[in-house]
Amino acid sequence: QKEVEQNSGPLSVPEGAIASLNCTYSDRGSQSFFWYRQYSGKSPELIMFIYSNGDKEDGRFTAQLNKASQYVSLLIRDSQPSDSATYLCAVNAGNMLTFGGGTRLMVKP
Amino acid sequence: EPEVTQTPSHQVTQMGQEVILRCVPISNHLYFYWYRQILGQKVEFLVSFYNNEISEKSEIFDDQFSVERPDGSNFTLKIRSTKLEDSAMYFCASSEEPGEETQYFGPGTRLLVL
C-alpha cells in the first residue's frame, strides 16, 4: 500500500514569514513528486514538481527532496494571506498520483 | 493558457440513477485521469486512460464505473447505479506523458447522491 503522509495542521504563520510544509512517502520506487495547492471547494492547482534529490526554487517556493529519507518539503518565503490554503503533496509511481491528506496553512496579516 | 474543463460543475441525482461526468482534457495531452475527493478526505485516484484503454485503475473503480473517450475531445466517467457513498468531487486530469509528467486538474464536478 503506497502511503503519503502529511501533518494536517493547521500551520499558522505571520505574514512575511517562512512556511515549511513536510511530506513523507512509503514507496521507494517513486520517481516524481508534486506540490499542489487547494483552496476550499476548488481543484488542486500545481505549484511545483521535483524529480531529483536536492532543492528546486521557483519564485517564493522551494521544494526539497531527499529520496534516502523518503521526504519531500515545500518552503514558502514571504508568506502572504493569499497563500492560505491546503497544500497537497503527491507522489507519482507509474500512471497515478498518490496524495497526502494535505496541510492546511493559515497566513495571518 | 490551455486548461482542463469539466461539466457539469454540480450534479444532484437519486440513488440508483446513472450519471455521466464530462471532461475536455488539454488538447495535446494523451493521458487522462479521474480522481475523486470525498468531503474532508484525500484526493483518491480512480483510473488512468491512454490510447482508448484503461492503463491503471484503483480498487474504488469497480464494475459500477466506466470511462470512455467518445470523440476526439471528450473524456467521460459513467457511474451506472449511484450510491450515497459516491457523493464527492470528481476531478479529471490530463498529462502529455505518463510517469513523471505533471498532471493538470480540471475544476471538478460536485456530485451529490440523495
Image: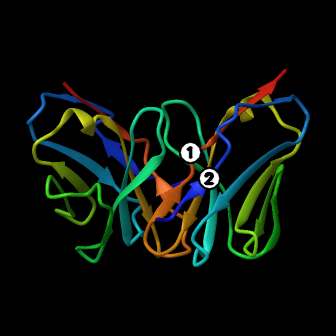
> Number of labelled discs?
2
Q: Quadrant of residue A50?
A: bottom right
Q: Amino acid at mark 2?
A: Glu
What kind of element bears circle 1? loop
Residue A70 at x, y = what percent?
Answer: 70, 68
Residue A19 at x, y = what percent?
Answer: 83, 41
Q: Quadrant of the C terminus of chain A?
A: top right
In three-dimensional space, the C-alpha distance between marks 2 and 1, rounded to whole angstroms, equals: 7 Å
What residue is rendered at 68% in x and 43% in y? A7
Q: Nearer the viewer, residue B53 or B15?
A: B15
Q: Amino acid at mark 1?
A: Gly
Q: Are marks 2 and 1 in contact (CB under 8 Å)?
A: yes
Q: Which residue in the protein does label 1 denote?
A: A101
For residue A11, above or below residue A67: above
Residue B92 at x, y = what percent?
Answer: 37, 52
Residues indicated by labels 2 and 1 sit on the same polypeptide chain: yes
For residue A26, above or below residue B62: below
Q: Quadrant of residue A16?
A: top right
- Label 1 marks a residue whose chain is A
How crowded pointer 2 is (Cα within 10 Å; few <14, some 14-19, many 20+) is rated as some
What residue is rendered at 43% in x and 42% in y? B107
Q: Which residue in the protein does label 2 denote?
A: A5
- Earlier residue among tags 2 and 1: 2
What residue is rendered at 38% in x and 70% in y? B31
What kind of element bears circle 2? strand
- Label 2 marks a residue whose chain is A
Q: Nearer the viewer, residue A106 or A66?
A: A66
How crowded pointer 1 is (Cα within 10 Å; few <14, some 14-19, many 20+) is rated as many
What residue is rendered at 91% in x and 36% in y? A17
